[in-house]
Image (spheres, rainbow, N blue to C red):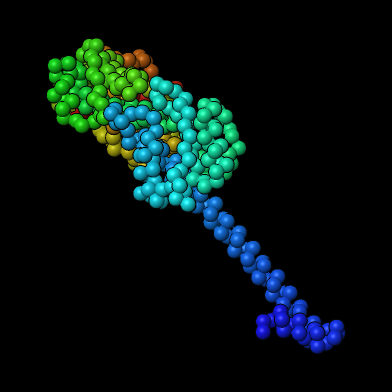
Amino acid sequence: MDLINYIKCAIVRQRGAVSPFLFGMLAGVAVLSGGIKIQADLEMKRIQEQQEQRSKETADTYRRAVEGALMAETTGTFGAVDTNAINSFVAKSIGGGTRSGQNIAIGTITTDVGTNSQQIIISTSDDNLVRTQITALETAGDAAAMAADTINNRDDVITIDTSGIRTKQIAETIDRMEKYSEILYSFWGKNGRFPTLVEYPAIAAQSSTTDFWGGAFTYAITSDNIAQLQATTPWAQVLTVPMNMDNVIVMPDSCAGLGNNAQGGICLAAGVGALVSAEQDEAGTPVFSTENVITGATSLLDGAANTDTYIGLGAAKYPVAALCHNLVLNGFDDWYLPSRNELSTLYTNKATIGGFTDWELYWTSTEATDSAANTVSFGDGLIYQSGKGSLGINTRCVRKGN
């Protein structure tokens, strides 16, 4: 006898009167039934959330499949989205199709005939109303209406605008051309010119780089210093990367002697290690230092070591040294503030170097006292001690040739 029948029989025996024992039993059954219902509701909610999450993941897999199909295009396969390719991609990921085994519902509207860009709507739903609505949206041919339709609020429906993927393909092609152009810039660096049209095929054969769709780049040259690379998309859009070396200053490999324009500036001697002066003063005339302390940067010969000492103590505290230390000029970044003797050499050859202001002081990196550094007058070459907090004193940076 089950519990319900037992309770009925007990009530009959009681002839309508309910004993405390029976009342307790009935109350217990009611509580048990309520608990089972709550548990069932929670389980149903969990299953529903799992199904929604699975729908989102499946829809996202199809989104990636569309992008994957387009990002795997070649010149020969360029065209509208290939449904078979999408299904093949998804089948490898999650098995493909809907939960009941139907094919996915896909609707497409071409938004740009030239690029074969499309507005695509995909659903993994088995609901016939949803599938019918997708067909209706495709038939209507209104891409904006397809994107705005309330059907897109469903977890198992996604819309994709493939024009964004076309933009990625263009960006990828331009990026490849820019990297490929480094080969041609390297040729220019060695020869002082870009390769001729006769020389180019041999250079191109050394690289397997192509445009996004596997096509070769087109090379054109206007002059020794001006050339360009081009790629043509399957929809006949021409992409161009220009190369222009007209305004580049070419420096000889090493200093040839006094006055030689090389190694980023004007050489003071020949060979490796020759002192090289920048061609002009640095902009601004900041204070030498924001603090008065002994730093030990007292070398008369080694401005690089002095400069390193100041930078080690804090570039912000030594603005003049920082001007030279941070300078990047004509491809060189190892400039420094000259020592007292190095700046005197610049004074001796100021007519050859050029750009100095007569009868003005220039900073050296040689410290004189805790509150002063040596400066050189470019009027008479005399050496002074100028307060580290002085303004209006010029700076000319130097480096060593290599």
303 up-or-down from 99: above or below: above
Q: Position of residue 87 (x, y in %)?
A: 39, 43
Q: Position of residue 218 (x, y in %)?
A: 24, 20
137 up-or-down from 100: above or below: above
**Residue 281, picture quadrant:** top left
Relative depth, front residue between 155 and 180: 155
Considering every residue shown, the one lying at the far top of the view is 222
Tally of numbered tags: 0
Relative depth, front residue between 354 and 184: 184
Q: In the shown orientation, is residue 149 left or right of residue 275? A: right
Q: Position of residue 53 (x, y in %)?
A: 52, 52
- In the image, what residue occupies the spot 80% across and 85% down? 12
**Residue 3, picture quadrant:** bottom right
Q: Is residue 109 visible?
A: yes
Relative depth, front residue between 41 and 230: 41
- In the image, what residue occupies the spot 67% across and 67% down? 37
- In the image, what residue occupies the spot 44% across and 50% down? 101
- In the image, what residue occupies the spot 29% across and 22% down? 231
Q: Quadrant of the C terminus?
A: top left
**Residue 311, picture quadrant:** top left
Q: In the shown orientation, is residue 47 left or right of residue 216? A: right
Q: Is residue 362 visible?
A: no
Q: Position of residue 213 (x, y in %)?
A: 29, 29
Q: In the shown orientation, is residue 45 left or right of residue 297? A: right
Q: Quadrant of the N terminus?
A: bottom right
